[in-house]
Image (cartoon, rainbow, N blue to C red):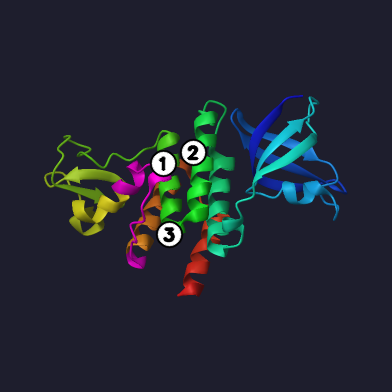
Amino acid sequence: MDQSEVYVLRTIDYREHAKLVYMLSESGIISAVAHGAKKMHSPLRLLTQSGNHLAVTLSTSRLPAMKDASLINRYEGIKNDLIKTTVASVIHELIYYNITDDDDHNKLFQFLLKTMHALETTRVPLEILMIFELKFLYFLGYGLDLRRCAVCGREYPLYFDTHTALTYCTDHVVDVNRSLDQKAFKPLEALLWVDISQFEPLDLKDESIDTYMRIIDDLYAHYLSVKTKAKSILYRLRVEGE
């Protein structure tokens, strides 16, 4: 039984005292039973919380059991902040419901750890979320091309059509009124291509954040038919915080 690094995405109750734990590893999403994890004094009760980075040893049975686990990082800075916790939940849902056996799981695992470190230490959690969402969409094969016209390949000036999620030049733009000009969508491009481990906050205004978040939501709805529960909660928290 080899030890592996994992990141806990979600848990569900399983039988009287156990939990089923779903974890992202370098080889993909794996599931295991954590026996006794629902007992008040079990060390697995805290270790198997979503958002934990663990080193685990699993049995080799058809439904593996968690034989041993140790904490690498609990990301206290995320868990102690409601907005950051909700952002993390959005990321957990996107990964759990959208990756396949054919994806580069090691690349995603390393990127997820970088994202959680950035989220824990940032003062702009929504910008971190948008970085993850844009890069994850690109990872899945649905990346935006914000550098050239979708029709002719022209690189300037450009408009991003918020309905089609495509970029057009002045000769091919369908409707300027529903499009962002090159200056307006520049932050979206910056979020897409930035190295998240070296990200410096853009300090976007609330209006811009709302615009970009809605665009990203439309992209996920169009390409993946996805709308996460945690994202709905995040929007409510933003309204309540105003």
Q: Would you say the residues marked 1 and 3 are in contact, meaning their CB atoms lie under 8 Å apart?
A: no
Depicted 232 relative to depicted 90: above or below: below
> What amino acid type is highlighted by mark number 2?
Phe
Q: Label 1: which residue?
A: 135
Please name the residue shown 39% across and 47% down the image: 219
Task: Pick the residue in front: 57 or 228.
Answer: 57
Task: Pick the residue in front: 40 or 73.
Answer: 73
Residue density around tag 3, few if under 14, some if 14–19, many if 20 or more, within 10 Å: some
Q: Label 3: which residue?
A: 124
Earlier-in-chain disc, 2 versus 3: 2
Whether residue 222 is visible: no
Q: Which residues make up the magenta segment?
A: 189-207
As helix, strand or loop, the secondary structure at mark 3 comes to loop
Please name the residue shown 45% across and 75% down the image: 242
Q: Label 2: which residue?
A: 111
Point out the residue furthest to the left here: 171
In the rendered view, does 1 fall on the left or right side of 41? Answer: left
Mark pair 2, 1: CA separation = 10 Å
Task: Where is residue 48? Give x, y as percent.
Answer: 72, 46
In the rendered view, does 50 fall on the left or right side of 89? Answer: right
As helix, strand or loop, the secondary structure at mark 1 comes to helix
Whether residue 92 is visible: yes
Task: Where is residue 175? Give x, y as percent.
Answer: 20, 54
205 within the magenta span = yes
Check the picture and name the quadrant holding the N terminus: top right
As helix, strand or loop, the secondary structure at mark 2 comes to helix
Q: Of tags 2 and 1, which is closer to the observer?
A: 2
